[in-house]
Image (cartoon, rainbow, N blue to C red):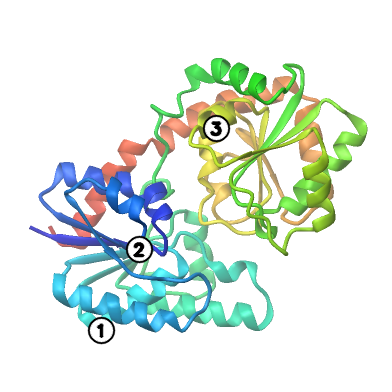
């Protein structure tokens, strides 16, 4: 029997990207499965009894408490004798890679779901790129969740060409087509629009994620503001927790909060229904690991607009399921959004293509099957 451990900084990452994979592995092997993340009573209580949980306090950002986290993980690793540890998210990956190397864990897998330093500049970029290189050096294998990020990492010389791979077509967890079921789109669309008072003839642009500069929300707000000056039937739906910070243009943010055509839904566990209410999904991000929301939108028949960055461009087909624009370019974003606004037939075509593309390339169970095969190879089974 093999023992494996999944490590992230916070439990929400495990819940969103790891838990279903772990359950699949449990059902198809006799392996013992453990999690390490910060303490969360609700997370602990809701875990199936066959999944083991170790809490390690990890703060966001650079903190001296990270040394304590490393020592705590080191003790857990020496006690449990894992055959494989898998880590992702910046802080957890640094602490786990150091502790696992010191503890002699034979397979140290870094799931490189985004590189924080890409969105930084100057000294801060240099520091975080060095940390990224250290994590990669300490890991025995690295798996980005997109081919474009693998290419970028090699170009950045984070690790050699012989080290690293992408499973299937990428993504951390694939798309659950039972939840993101296109056949329910019209029903969901009607219900959500009615709930938020959105007219049926309105054109709804949508965004799902954290409200930060790196997600491109400043450009999104500016673009929608411009378009609303020409067409009052445009709406913007912002789905996710409102965690705006100082990186967001406060003038644009306040404008968005006070505009009746900009709707903040808050966190939602029915994202598939929210996506169905949209006519176009927009992700104007500066950096992403993958951008799973792009594939989820496509699965629900929604055309997409993404920036030309590693990750999201792997989750769509340019000029087939949507449009690609340069990052940080309001004029290009405005042109792309206006083109789809004025082209209902193009929107329909992109949406239909997206449903097929998502199903053929990112279906969750097929991805889980391939992840398990990959883990067996890493464990030399």
Quarter-of-image position of residue 20: top left
Residue 317 shows up from this direction? yes
Q: Quadrant of the N terminus?
A: bottom left
Q: Is residue 152 left or right of residue 32?
A: right
Name the mark on residue 102.
1
Q: Which residue does the numbered mark 3 point to in the structure image?
A: 298
Are the residues at dot 3 and dot 2 in contact (C-beta closer than 8 Å)?
no
**257 relative to 312 in the view: left or right:** right
| Residue furthest out toward the right | 229
Label 2 vs label 1, nearer the camera: 2
Q: Position of residue 130 (x, y in %)?
A: 51, 82
When the figure is inspected, residue 326 is found, relative to residue 124, above or below; the finding is above
- Furthest-front residue in this view: 41
The residue indicated by pointer 2 is 37
Query: What's the residue at 62%, 80% (across, down)?
Result: 124
Residue 239 spot, x, y in % from top left? 61, 40
The residues tagged by marks 2 and 1 sit, at their Cα atoms, a distance apart of 19 Å
Label 1, secondary structure: give it: helix
Task: Report the front residue among 149 and 289.
Answer: 289
Give the number of the mark in front: 3 or 1. Answer: 1
N-terminal-most mark, 2 or 1? 2
Q: Residue at x 39, y 49 (%)?
A: 17
Q: Quadrant of the C terminus?
A: bottom left
The disc at residue 34 is none
In this rendering, position of residue 23 left or right of residue 358: left
Residue at x 25%, y 84% (from the top left corner): 102
Question: Mark 3 falls on what kind of element?
Answer: helix
Q: CA distance from mark 3 to mark 2?
A: 31 Å
The crowd level at tag 1 (other Cα within 10 Å; few <14, some 14-19, many 20+) is some
Q: Position of residue 330 (x, y in %)?
A: 81, 50
């Amino acid at each position: 029997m093999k023992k494996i451990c999944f490590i992230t900084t916070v439990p929400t990452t495990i819940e969103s990207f790891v838990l279903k994979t772990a359950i699949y592995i449990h059902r198809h092997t006799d392996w013992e499965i453990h999690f390490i993340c910060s303490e969360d009573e609700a997370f602990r209580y809701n875990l199936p009894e066959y999944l083991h949980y170790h809490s390690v306090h990890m703060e966001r950002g650079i903190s001296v408490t990270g040394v304590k986290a490393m020592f705590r993980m080191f003790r857990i690793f020496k006690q449990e004798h894992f055959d494989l540890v898998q880590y992702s998210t910046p802080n957890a990956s640094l602490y786990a890679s150091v502790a696992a190397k010191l503890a002699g864990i034979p397979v140290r897998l870094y799931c490189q779901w985004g590189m924080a330093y890409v969105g930084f500049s100057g000294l801060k970029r240099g520091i975080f790129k060095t940390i990224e290189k250290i994590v990669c050096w300490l890991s025995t294998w690295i798996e980005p969740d997109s081919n474009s990020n693998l290419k970028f990492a090699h170009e950045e010389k984070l690790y050699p060409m012989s080290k690293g791979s992408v499973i299937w077509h990428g993504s951390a967890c694939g798309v659950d087509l039972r939840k993101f079921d296109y056949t329910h789109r019209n029903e969901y669309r009607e219900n959500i629009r009615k709930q938020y008072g959105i007219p049926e003839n309105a054109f709804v642009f949508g965004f799902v994620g954290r409200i930060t500069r790196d997600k491109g929300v400043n450009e999104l707000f500016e673009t929608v503001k411009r378009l609303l000056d020409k067409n009052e039937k445009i709406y913007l739906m912002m789905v996710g927790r409102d965690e705006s910070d100082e990186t967001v243009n406060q003038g644009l943010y306040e404008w968005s909060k006070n505009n009746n055509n900009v709707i903040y839904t808050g966190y939602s566990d029915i994202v598939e229904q929210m996506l169905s209410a949209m006519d176009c999904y927009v992700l104007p991000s500066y950096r992403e690991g993958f951008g799973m929301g792009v594939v989820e939108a496509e699965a629900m028949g929604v055309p997409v607009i993404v920036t030309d960055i590693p990750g999201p461009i792997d989750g769509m087909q340019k000029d087939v399921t949507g449009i690609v624009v340069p990052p940080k370019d309001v004029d290009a974003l405005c042109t792309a959004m206006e083109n789809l606004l004025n082209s209902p037939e193009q929107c329909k075509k992109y949406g239909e293509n997206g449903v097929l593309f998502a199903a053929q390339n990112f279906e969750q169970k097929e991805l889980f099957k391939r992840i398990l095969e990959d883990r067996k190879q890493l464990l030399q089974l």
